[in-house]
Image (cartoon, rainbow, N blue to C red):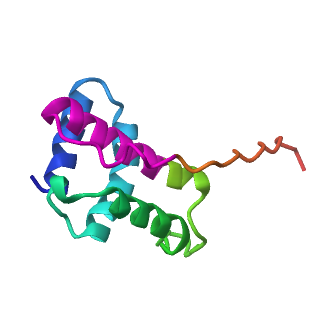
Amino acid sequence: MKLSKAFEGFTIARISEGMSPGTAENYSYPMMKLINHLGDPDIGDVAINDLRSFLHWYATDYTPNRYGGNTKPLSPASVDIGWKAIRSLFRWLHEEYDLPRPDIRQKRRSFKTPPKQPFTFQ
């Protein structure tokens, strides 16, 4: 099964189980980037080094194409969503199809959420 088809099945299954459409949409962006980055391999061919390569590229070399033209690297929180999407997909594949999990040794990147700035009436 191709990675793109696996993600499609994952999305359908999780939404039918109650995943919010917003979460599904948040996961779809980094997953499409992963699929493009790896060339849509068979899920059994995805290895830990493929995931590490993608997450490194996504955090450092990927240039977002935002509406306002801002091309700054993704925030650590955005990269974390990509990690969560990968983790969720491969957990589901393991539970659903008893496939090995290449993601299991990929540690979560550490980051601190920036403090919220109070609103002022200036």
**Does residue 106 belong to the magenta stretch?**
yes
What is the magenta segment's predominant secondary structure? helix
Furthest-top residue in view? 17
Residue at image coords 55%, 70%: 60
Q: How many marks?
A: 0
Vertically, is 94 above or below 49?
above
Position of residue 30 measured from the top left corner of the image (x, y, whole percent)? 38, 57
Which residue sits at x=30%, y=36%? 91
Q: Which residue is drawn at 51% across and 55% down?
A: 79
Q: Does the magenta stretch include residue 48?
A: no
- Residue 92 in percent (x, y) is at 25, 35
Residue 86, position as x, y percentages in the image = 36, 48
Q: In which quarter of the image is residue 51?
A: bottom left
Segment tinted magenta in the rendering: 81-107
Q: Which of 62 and 102 is in front in this view?
A: 102
In the rendering, at what x and y percent does residue 20 appear?
Answer: 36, 31
Compare residues 88 and 17 and report the one nearer the observer. 88
72 left or right of 100? right
Q: Which residue lies furthest to the right in this view?
A: 122
Q: Is residue 53 left or right of residue 108?
A: left
In the image, residue 102 sits, relative to residue 72, either above or below, namely above
Residue shown at the point (18%, 53%) measured from the top left = 43
Quick check: 15 left or right of 61? left
Q: Which of 38 and 65 is in front in this view?
A: 38
Up-down relation of residue 13 to residue 30 (above or below): above
